[in-house]
Amino acid sequence: MSASYIPYHPEQQQLLPRALQDWLPQGHLVYFINDTVDSLNLSGFHLRYEAGGPRNQPFHPAMMVKVLVYAYATGVFSSRKIARKLFEDVAFRVLGADNFPAHRTIRAFRALHLSEFTDLFVQVVLLAREMGLVKLGTIAVDGTKIKANASRHKAMSYGRMQTTEIDLNAQIAVLLQKAANTDEAEKNEPDLDIPAELERRQTRLAAIVAAKARLEERRRQSDTQRGRSPSDERQPKDKDGKPKGGKPYQRDFGVPAAKAQESFTDPESRIMKRAGGGFDYSYNAQTAVDESAHIIAAAEVVNTSSDVQQLPMVLAAVKTHTGVQAQQVLADAGYRSEAVMAELAKTQPQTELVIALGREGKVLAKPRDAKRYPHSVAMAAKFDTEQGKLDYRKRKWIAEPPNGWIKNVLGFRQFSMRGLEKVKAEFKLVCLALNLRRMGAMQAS
């Protein structure tokens, strides 16, 4: 006897079209993002199109925002992949509602509305606070390195720039001499498009000169912060300009090290050490995570690998977004700084700081000079108490999961955009998408 199967007729057409919403179960993330975006203020997105003018009708900003937010929330960051998903993926088609913007349109919309996405992140944080998911009782601050959209092969060290600049100047001089020769003298020369060769070398030379200037300017700023001056003759001097003890400086004021590198594709990115070894052009992404539901209350990006000076900036962002200060802030030893703790004691006196003075499991000499390091001494005393240790133990499970979700769940390991300001906005879009994904999961449960 033959088996009996449930009817299967792939060639049969449906007599009546089914609603796209019927293909998705209740509680799907699409519905939460759709309803949430509709409740937000999108006037900044509409403002760009209010003037009208002789052009094609633009796609509705609400639809574009929903598609982009859902794409980032599900780990789709490429504009080409998003455009393809609008045809192939039911969830994307529900949000698109039979709109199919090209990948160039999606990319341009994202690039044109960077400040609006930044504002949208703040609106979502406030919405999470109204829902009781952000209480600002305890927040934990952490940093993570995210690769820049820059190639290591399109970069050059300062030492290489110097030698290449000399070589290019010599080649340009030879080409100019050839161009000045008479046609008779060039009869036996091989064919060479001298104007094109000149333009190629001059363009490369200009890029190298600009990169050298950026490296030298950064070095001058760094030397000035260290107390150096152009006339110090490599000798350490005090505030009055008098020589003081110590080894002489290795280089003149404002001269970078020969191994200092600059990227030609994203000059604002910096070489940073990556987890597992090696170095990449990256940015340092900072997050402030609320204890209640792991909602990211502040998301900032800097192009400095060190975390030590970033705490005031992140806590100021939390206060700006929510209007209140956190009651308690947890941070690892990378944020340890006497000057920073002194500054926060003045600007945010109601906030209790719990900052590790050293790496977990390692014994470090505790600061004992209460006159020079009063805040560090007080912090060391706090960590001697059971309550201080108990408070700090919460840091790891508050701060680190969102960074793990960004990289391993969403798969966001490299920025799509270039330049510090654009990267800041893109990271807020990532954190906005993660917050909505988290809020949707909390609501569904």
Image (spheres, rainbow, N blue to C red):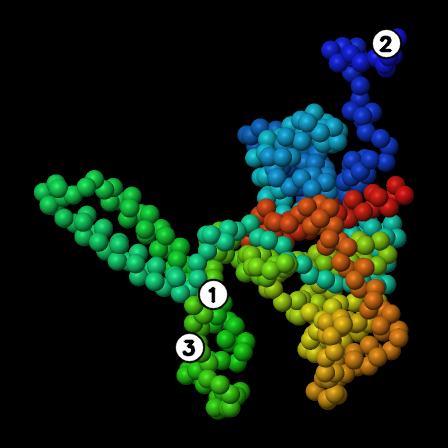
| Amino acid type, mark 3 | Asp
Q: CA distance from mark 3 to mark 1?
A: 15 Å
Give the vertical position of 90 relative to 351 (above or below): above
Residue found farthest to the front:
1
Numbered label tally: 3
Q: Are marks 3 and 2 in contact (CB under 8 Å)?
A: no
- Quadrant housing the N terminus: top right
Q: Which residue is mark 1?
A: 260
Q: Which mark is residue 252?
A: 3
Q: Secondary structure at mark 1?
A: loop
Instruction: Residue 95 in the image: state x and y as whole percent.
Output: 74, 32
Image disc number at residue 2: 2
> Taking 171 as reference, is 375 left or right?
right
Q: Determine the residue positioned at 46% across, 84% down.
A: 248
Residue 172: x and y in percent read: 26, 54
Residue 27 lies in quadrant: top right
